[in-house]
Image (cartoon, rainbow, N blue to C red):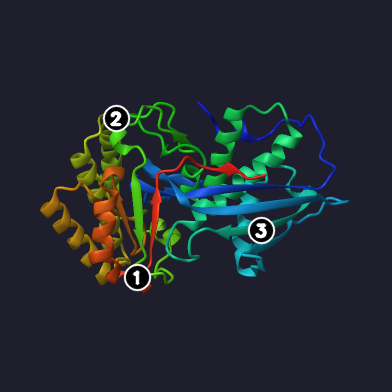
Amino acid sequence: MTKATDFIPQEYTHEVTEKGNFQWSAPSNIALVKYWGKKENQIPANPSISFTLNNCKTITKLEFEPIKSTSENFSFDLFLDGKSKEDFKPKMQKFFERVEIYLPFLKDFHFAISTENTFPHSSGIASSASGMGAMAVNLMSIEKLFNPEMTEEYFWKKASFLARLGSGSACRSIKGSVVVWGETESVENSSDLFGVEFSETIHSNFQNYQDTILLVDKGEKVVSSTVGHELMHNHPFAKNRFEQAHENLAQMKQILIHGNLEKFVSLVESEALTLHAMMMTSMPYFILMKPNTLEIINKIWKFRQDTGVQVCFTLDAGANVHVLYPENDKEKVLQFIKNELIVYCQNQQYICDEIGSGAQKLN
C-alpha cells in the first residue's frame, strides 16, 4: 500500500542547471458521488467518484530558472491571462509549503507561472481543481529532469498526490475519464492520497457522456468550500453521510459497468441534493442554491417525465447546474436547454462539455 513517505525522493540522479519551461493543461471534473468533509492534510472524510471533463480546463506554462544561491523563500511570479495576479500568490505559497518535502528542489529555482482558463473565470466551475492539477503535472515534469528513470505510473500517481495537497478534488483531474478518490472496499487500490482511474470497462451508454453547465450565478460563493468542509466535523448527520457515500460508490461502480441509466439518474441527483442538505443542516447553516437553480431542477424533472429522455442534474458546492445526458440524446437536450433553461442562466450563459481523459502536455 502506498504511503505519503513513498513520494519523498531519496537522491536525484541528475542535476538541472539550465532554465526551461513546460506547459500542461488539466481539466475540471464533476463528482457523481460527492466528497464533503475532510481530515488533516487534505484527506477526504469519504470516497468520491467523478467524470473528468474535456473542455473546461486550465492551461499553465511553468518557466523555471536556477537561482545562484539557494533562497530561504520560494521565488515565483504568477500571471492569469497575461496579467500579474498578486492575490493568487498566497494560495500558491501555501501549496509550495505543503509539497516542499516531496519536491526538495523548489527553493533552487525562480518560477514564472502563467495560467489561463478556457471557461469564464470565477464562473463557479472548479477552477482550483484544474489549476492545481495543471501545476502538479508541470512540477512532476521538472522532477523527471532530476530523475529521468521515473516510471510513468509513479509520475501520474505522484502528480495526483501533489494536486490533492493544492485542492482536494484536483487529484481527480490528472488521469482518466472516471476517477475514484478515497479508500473504499468496493474499488481495488483506491487511496485517500491520490485519485485512481476507474479500472473496469465502462458501459457504452456512458461513452462520450455530455455535461452542459448552466451558469446560474457567477458571483463569489457566500461560504467557501474550505469552510463548508470544516462544518462537517460536528455535523449531526456526518457519520451516516460518510457511510452512505461508501454504499453509493459501490452502487455507482455497478451502474457504470452495466449501463443502467435510470439508476444513474436517481443516484446522481440524490447525491447532489444530499450535498446541499449537508450544507443546510450544518451549524452555521447556509444555502448555495439560488431560486433559478430550483427552477431548472423542476424543469429537468418535467422534461424527463414527459419525454423519457434520461437527462439529469448534478450540483457542485454552488448554484450552477451540470446537466448530464447520453451523447445520443444531445440534440433533444440542447434544444430543451435553449428553449426552456437558458432564461434562468446569468446572461443566458452555458458551457457544453463532455467526458475527457485528464491532463495533457502541450509542448
| N-term mark: 3 or 2 | 3
Can you give x and y, in whole percent of width and height, for residue 145 in the image?
A: 74, 36
Can you give x and y, in whole percent of width and height, for residue 27 in the image?
A: 49, 49
Q: Is residue 298 left or right of residue 118?
A: left
Residue placed under numbered mark 1 in the picture: 348
In the picture shown, does residue 264 fall above or below 283? above
Q: Tell me, yes or no, whether the two marked residues, 2 and 1, touch with CB atoms within 8 Å.
A: no
Q: Tell me, yes or no, whether the two marked residues, 3 and 2, touch with CB atoms within 8 Å.
A: no
Q: Tell me if residue 90 can be seen.
A: yes
Q: Which mark is residue 257?
A: 2
Q: Residue at x 49, y 45 (%)?
A: 173
Q: Mark 2 or mark 1: which is in front?
A: 1
Q: Residues within 10 Å of mark 1 (few under 14, many from 20)?
A: few
Task: Identify which amino acid the numbered label 3 is placed on.
Answer: Ser
Q: Nearer the viewer, residue 8 or 160?
A: 160
Q: Nearer the viewer, residue 59 or 307?
A: 307
| N-term mark: 1 or 3 | 3
Using the rendered view, name the quadrant where residue 125 is placed: bottom left
Residue placed under numbered mark 3 in the picture: 114
Instruction: Give the position of the C terminus as an image quadrant.
Output: top right
Using the rendered view, name the quadrant where residue 277 is placed: bottom left
Task: Identify which amino acid the numbered label 1 is placed on.
Answer: Gln
Task: Identify which amino acid the numbered label 2 is placed on.
Answer: Ile
Helix, strand or loop at label 1? It is helix
Can you give x and y, in whole percent of width and height, for residue 50 in the image?
A: 38, 43
